[in-house]
């Protein structure tokens, strides 16, 4: 990759840091997060802004300058500050409260067509220069084991800022309000007869990052995620137990999302579900029609479509850990993956999606594209390095590093099932099912390393006979393989019941990294899927 | 880089001295680590990372709160202490809070830190990887792998004078070879405290051999078969078993080791005679951190001895409530083996499925410790003491309690990278039955 004229990116040194900043919209964010006196009940405001942006831009420039001096044809630097707050309650008490911040910088370089990376918790111009030089040392050492040179797909220079749209910053909500919420959930759940344990939690994460590249991009982003939840365990007189996890999804957003979930109001129903499971009939064995609620199906989408359409997996780049993929590049645009009604799209712009952002960690503007169109496999997830591997001109903006200390690589965007065009409701699906099981929530799941064979459980299972829900079941799992399963899809509800689940813990890579990602879908039916009973001796 | 107990103590003391809480515990962790990945027969990403993290937990009576930072200038340390105090004051009382520990005595662990390991930098990593790639190319295969080496430390100081420090080096290598048609795949991997002791060439050769010999896999119908599990797979099973050994969960009726309403199965023979499970930080095969996250000394424990459940894991809270001795959470786990290799286990088998490693292991039923997972990267049918032919992978549904109660023979225990504990040592084994529940087309 040829380096553009350095004068274009001397945005700091040529004009002085402060003056150069005027052109950087990211300034707006820092101003909004300016230090304010700590308030009683709130975490101190000084955690909100990692440091003054002027100083951090000088740090970034020092890294880029040192990388160039060491012979890098490309370099980028991320200064990242991640804050997390976790609050948990067990029955009648708060069992844990922690807040953390991690601040540091990571520098990537390409020297002689080979990547190098280095990172440190020290954030200063001197440390940035040292880290950048170390990244170049790594790249030069590894040249001996590199074949073809790394090439990056072109991307326009961006000077921009992006922030999670939110009304109330969860880190500024008083702790009393948070602990009250958790204890109220537990009280409401444990008031239900037979409910013995209740664990509830709130997990907030804020990622602030400054990205700067040798090509001249400067991007500031401020991303906030909320994950509330709870689990109730019911114990029978004989010591048998069953748990029910509430279906609340983690989302990008503010405290208003948590409040809108009405978790306290939901707690008795969730507890009653746990109790009901204890007395539920054992699940059947054999082929059944499955009606999968979005609180369940999102994870099946993640595992069976999200992962196999990662281009690095498909080409063998994750063979040693996460595995490869049955969606090899010769199948692109050809493989009939599922029923004609199945269209699955990737989207890093979906409001509230955990993987939504303005720019990825390659500095590429995010967007939306199809992975499966009318049942045919049509698209991969890519980064700047990968786009050229399949002859695409631009990256799909899927680069992400989960910390300042992690090297960015291809991670999953939000991947969602397009709702059906015709009006169709969950009730319609149930009333037109003769012999099936309706599954809600996520239980145990496991899928093989090429994403064929999978086995999924849920939270609640209901027998459906002759168009009606007849009784609850327990110990149900279904086992299928990906193309067979998606080909058996015969009813996708319309957009009115489209809902997005997700996780903070999509794992991939060595050393392992996590990725936060969401998946939306409406209730959907799959015909004649193999159902197991997993309650037996083993 | 912090590398001595004195340096760590200095930072921790500044935090504890600043504390205005009734009691406080400060933990400092850090290290330097370097890694190199390769795939498709060339290096992909590589890097060096230095980390340092301070965590402070403050308590006022039964109210406690924790704050973590990695900015270690005086002002940031003070701010971290104050944040933990501010949050602690706002918390309701936690009836399960146990006061921080006073001075403790720890087992001496020699050799956890190998001085020479520190010199294992980018150039030292690249050289053997270049050789591994050459071996893959020479065999006509597509190779991927990961090499990591570094050092780390953990230091703890409490307001009551408990100070603990442990420093260790570690390295791991794993590699996967695949045939160009995607029909064969082989894996090998191990870890060690000294990167110079990792035999990358030997591991690479094992992966190459497995890839070549697994390319013509036949379909074996799902069912219950005798099994030979290589050490990596056994490491997964014993880690799951260790995780389930909680005294509290057992007494509360929530575990496979519950007996009636409050009793446990301690003292009962649950597994085969050959199966023992122990943790001991000073053991020559483990050399693991001799204290847990609260600074509690980790003593030698036999969790399982000759198949008999001897001891469950007791937290400090549960110990106090029930008048038991706390065990803490082990930092190393050892299942002693017998003598001999996987080849010896094969030679002694009439019929069996040989499993290289497991993938995507998840609970099915925690009460029974039943799990589901898949086999991966080298699954073979054994007949009359020999590898007869490769077979396609399986999904399996089974429990470590069942497998480990049907053990026929053990091989020599080795350090594995599949463990969930700091250091896990496990042997390959042969068992009379394993439930292969469905076929997987994945290679």
Image: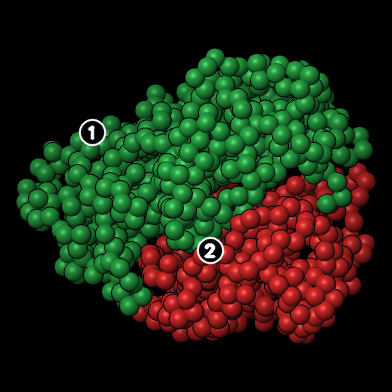
Chain colours: A green, B red
Is residue A507 visible in the rendered image? The answer is yes
Q: Quadrant of residue B40?
A: bottom left
Q: Which residue is mark 2?
A: B182
Q: Residue at x 70, y 18 (%)?
A: A432
Give the image location of residue A253, x and y in percent.
43, 30
In the rendered structure, the answer to whether residue B324 lies left or right of residue B210 reads right
Q: Residue at x 64, y 58 (%)?
A: B359
Q: Is residue B83 visible?
A: no
| Viewer-closest of A217 and A113 | A113
Residue on which disc 1 sits: A28
Q: Quadrant of residue A299?
A: top right
Q: Residue at x 53, y 52 (%)?
A: A326
Q: Which mark is residue A201?
A: none
Under tag 1, what secondary structure? helix
Q: Where is B240 relative to B128, above or below?
A: above
B177 or A501, which is in the foreground?
B177
Q: Residue, x 73% and y 77% (percent of image)?
A: B387
Q: Position of residue A159 (x, y in %)?
A: 19, 41
Pick the quarter of the image with the N terminus of chain A.
bottom left
Mark 1 to mark 2 CA distance (whole Å) = 51 Å
Q: Nearer the viewer, residue B19 or A297?
A: A297
- Determine whether the residue tagged by mark 2 lies in a helix, strand or loop: loop
């Amino acid at each position: 990759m040829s380096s553009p004229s350095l004068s274009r990116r001397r945005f700091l040194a040529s004009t002085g840091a402060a003056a150069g900043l005027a052109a950087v919209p990211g300034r707006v964010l820092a101003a909004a997060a300016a230090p304010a006196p700590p308030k009683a009940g709130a975490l101190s405001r000084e955690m909100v802004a990692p440091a003054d942006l002027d100083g951090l831009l000088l740090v970034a420039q020092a890294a880029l300058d040192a990388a160039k001096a060491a012979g890098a044809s490309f370099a980028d630097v991320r200064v990242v500050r991640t804050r997390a707050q976790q609050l948990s309650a067990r029955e009648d008490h708060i069992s844990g409260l922690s807040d953390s911040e991690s601040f540091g910088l990571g520098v990537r370089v390409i020297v002689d067509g080979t990547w190098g990376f280095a990172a440190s918790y020290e954030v200063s111009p001197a440390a940035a220069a040292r880290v950048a030089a170390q990244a170049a040392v790594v790249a030069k050492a590894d040249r001996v084991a590199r074949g073809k040179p790394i090439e990056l797909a072109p991307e326009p220079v961006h000077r921009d800022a992006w922030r999670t749209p939110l009304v109330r910053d969860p880190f500024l909500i008083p702790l009393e309000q948070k602990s009250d919420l958790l204890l109220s959930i537990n009280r409401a759940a444990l008031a239900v007869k037979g409910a013995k344990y209740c664990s509830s939690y709130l997990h907030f994460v804020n990622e602030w990052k400054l990205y700067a590249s040798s090509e001249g991009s400067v991007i500031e982003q401020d991303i906030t995620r909320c994950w509330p939840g709870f689990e109730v365990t019911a114990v029978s007189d004989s010591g048998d137990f069953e748990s029910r996890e509430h279906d609340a999804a983690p989302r990008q957003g503010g405290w208003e999302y948590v409040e809108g979930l009405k978790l306290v109001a939901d707690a008795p129903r969730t507890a009653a579900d746990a109790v009901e499971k204890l007395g539920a009939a054992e699940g059947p064995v054999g082929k059944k029609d499955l009606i999968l609620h979005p609180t369940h199906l999102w994870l099946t989408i993640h595992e069976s479509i999200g992962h196999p359409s990662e281009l690095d997996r498909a080409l063998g780049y994750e063979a040693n850990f996460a595995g490869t993929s049955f969606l090899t590049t010769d199948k692109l645009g050809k493989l009939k993956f599922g029923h004609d009604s199945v269209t699955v799209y990737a989207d890093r712009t979906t409001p509230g999606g955990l993987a939504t952002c303005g720019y990825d960690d390659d500095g590429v503007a995010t967007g939306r594209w199809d992975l499966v169109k009318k049942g045919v496999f049509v698209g991969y997830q890519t980064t700047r390095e990968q786009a050229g591997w399949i002859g695409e001109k631009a990256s799909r903006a899927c680069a992400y590093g989960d910390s300042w200390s992690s090297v960015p690589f291809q991670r999953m965007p939000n991947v969602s099932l397009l709702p059906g065009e015709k009006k169709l409701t969950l009730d319609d699906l149930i009333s037109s099912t003769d012999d099936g099981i309706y599954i809600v929530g996520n239980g145990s799941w496991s899928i093989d390393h090429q994403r064929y064979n999978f086995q999924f459980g849920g939270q609640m299972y209901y027998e459906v006979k002759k168009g009606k829900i007849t009784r609850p079941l327990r110990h149900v799992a279904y086992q299928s393989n990906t193309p067979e399963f998606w080909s058996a899809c015969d009813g996708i509800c319309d957009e009115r019941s489209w809902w997005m689940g997700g996780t903070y813990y999509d794992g991939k890579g060595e050393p392992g990294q996590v990725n936060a990602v969401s998946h939306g879908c409406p209730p959907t039916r799959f015909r004649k899927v193999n159902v197991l009973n997993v309650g037996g001796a083993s | 880089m912090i590398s001595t107990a004195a340096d760590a103590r200095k930072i921790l003391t500044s935090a504890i001295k600043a504390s205005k809480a009734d009691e406080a515990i400060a933990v400092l962790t850090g290290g330097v680590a370097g890694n190199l990945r390769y795939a498709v027969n060339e290096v992909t990403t590589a890097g060096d990372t230095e980390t340092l993290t301070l965590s402070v937990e403050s308590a006022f009576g039964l109210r406690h709160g924790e704050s973590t930072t990695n900015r270690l200038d005086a002002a940031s340390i003070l701010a971290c202490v104050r944040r933990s105090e501010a949050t602690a004051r706002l918390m309701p009382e936690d009836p399960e809070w146990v006061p921080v520990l006073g001075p403790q005595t720890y087992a001496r662990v020699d050799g956890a830190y190998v001085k020479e390991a520190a010199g294992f930098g980018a150039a030292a990593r690249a050289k053997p990887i270049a050789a591994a790639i050459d071996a893959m190319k020479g065999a006509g295969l597509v190779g991927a792998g990961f090499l990591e080496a570094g050092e780390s430390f953990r230091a703890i100081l409490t307001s009551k004078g408990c100070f603990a420090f442990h420093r260790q080096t570690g390295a791991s290598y794993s590699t996967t070879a695949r045939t160009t048609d995607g029909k064969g795949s082989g894996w090998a991997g191990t870890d060690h405290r000294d990167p110079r002791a990792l035999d990358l060439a030997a591991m690479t050769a094992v992966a190459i051999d497995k890839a070549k010999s697994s390319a013509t896999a036949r379909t074996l119908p799902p069912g219950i078969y005798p099994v030979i599990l290589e050490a990596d797979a056994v490491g997964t099973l014993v880690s799951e078993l260790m995780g389930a050994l909680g005294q509290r969960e057992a007494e509360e009726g929530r575990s496979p080791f519950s007996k009636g309403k409050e009793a446990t199965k301690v003292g009962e023979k649950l597994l085969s005679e050959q199966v023992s499970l122990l943790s001991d930080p000073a053991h020559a095969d483990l050399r693991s951190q001799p204290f847990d996250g609260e600074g509690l000394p980790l003593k030698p424990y036999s969790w399982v001895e000759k198949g008999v459940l001897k001891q469950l894991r007791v937290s400090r809270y549960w110990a106090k409530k029930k008048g038991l001795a706390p065990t803490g959470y082990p930092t190393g786990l050892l299942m002693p083996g017998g003598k001999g290799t996987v080849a010896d286990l094969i030679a002694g088998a009439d019929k069996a499925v040989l499993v290289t490693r497991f993938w995507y292991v998840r609970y099915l039923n925690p009460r029974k410790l039943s799990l589901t997972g898949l086999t991966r990267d080298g699954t073979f049918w054994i007949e009359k003491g020999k590898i007869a032919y490769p077979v396609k992978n399986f999904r399996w549904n089974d429990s470590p309690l069942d497998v480990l109660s049907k053990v026929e023979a053990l091989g020599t225990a080795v350090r594995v990278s599949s463990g969930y504990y700091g250091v896990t040592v496990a042997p390959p084994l042969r068992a009379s039955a394993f439930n292969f529940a469905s076929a997987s087309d994945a290679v």
